Image (cartoon, rainbow, N blue to C red):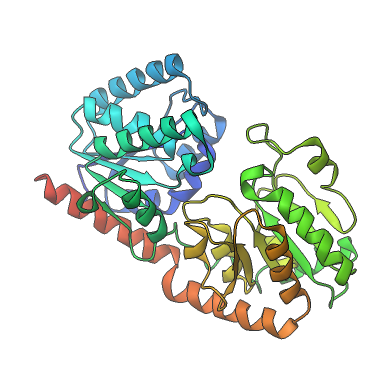
Amino acid sequence: MFRGRSLVHVFSVADSLIFVSDQVRRLRELGMDVTLVTSPDERLVRAGLNLGVRTVGVPMARRVSPLEDWASLNRLRDLFTSLRPDIVHAHTPKGGLLGMLAASAAHVPVRLYQMRGLAYVTQRGPMRALLSTTERVSCQSATKVVCQSKSLLETALEDRLVRADRAEVLLEGSNGVDTRRFNRERWRRDGEALRRAWGAAPDDVVFVFVGRLVRDKGVPELLEAFGAVRREVPSAQLVLVGPLEERDALSPDTVARLNGSGVRSLGFQADPAPYLAAADVLVLPSHREGFPNVPLEAAAMGLPVVSTTVPGCRDAVDRDVTGRLVPPADARALAQAMLDYAKSAELRRKHGAAGLARVEAKFRREVVTEAVMGLYVREMARVGLTG
């Protein structure tokens, strides 16, 4: 099917390669020559060795930096001209912009932009205008735009980033979930050990947040909401799993509260699964997402989810069936949703079971991987390339 064909994945940072690792393995099985491109990073090198594919480090600044971006664009164009891939599949706002412009300049026949989120939605003024313009450029330079969720596609169409005939969502969206890895029974003993270490009794409710500790993830209002929860349920605990970042940084006052009463901040953890196994409810009060992985991973482990009504999050949660959705930046509504679960073990059980069933039915990673393979076949056929 893909023997003799070649593809390049472009991400701005190597951490994001986890999104496509299963797809790359499948492509290698089918005979595709694959190259991974991110900013230089030893994690890129390790990924290449683990997956058996070529890697190339191209510096890509995460911030807006015209001179650096121009240099990156030229390096990517030269790389694509040399490799002559059949497909360039570029992801994330910066990787998408540079990857699509360079692929277009190098006359790559299939140019796929994976829209994983829209950074401009939480911006105002000139920065919002700039970031929305770069999204339009990425979309215009692509031969197909793949939106990470249905609500993200709706936003892209409403904001006229892309025409409807040039964009789609694969299946129900998302990267899919490895249900063999995110399996509560597999991690049961690890979860129990963590709860003992935290001093959480079997009946105590543990809320967990997994993600970057930044304002856009709703961390300030999460801490405020949890304070209200503790006043009514003093035994409740909140565990934060993720790194503090300088970009979109928390205020000093918020950072000081990260290890307050009932709150435990654990920093970056390579594998979130044991922490999900130790928890009773996942809380992800993001202000913007494309289609967050963590709510589905939590659901696969039988956890109900509290999240927000923003695009992406509302695809990850079936409202009042697998979890609660509240307006973004609304600490009072967030606290009430958390209290609903803190006070009802039956509600936790019911919504957790529904979430697991939903993941098994719609979001298994192997099904998503095969959908991506089908996308490649269709797009190559559309430009006259045969498998």
| Residue 176 occupies quadrant | bottom left
Q: Residue 302: horizontal and vertical position, in percent?
A: 62, 74
Name the quadrant containing residue 214: top right
Q: Is residue 365 left or right of residue 344?
A: left
Q: Using the rendered image of the protein, determine whether residue 103 is visible from the camera's viewpoint.
A: yes
Residue 310 located left or right of residue 93: right
Q: Position of residue 131 (x, y in %)?
A: 43, 33
Residue 122 in the image: state x and y as whole percent. Answer: 53, 42
Which quadrant, please, contains the N terminus? bottom left
Q: Is residue 271 above or below residue 70?
A: below
> Which residue is drawn at the image coordinates 79% and 43% (left, top)?
254
Residue 254 lies, with reference to residue 183, above or below; the image says above
Query: Closest to the observer: 27 or 328?
Result: 328
Whether residue 178 is visible, yes or no, is no
* Foreground of the two, 60 or 84: 60
Residue nearest the viewer, comparing 189 with 322: 322
Query: Residue 250 at x, y = what percent?
Result: 72, 39
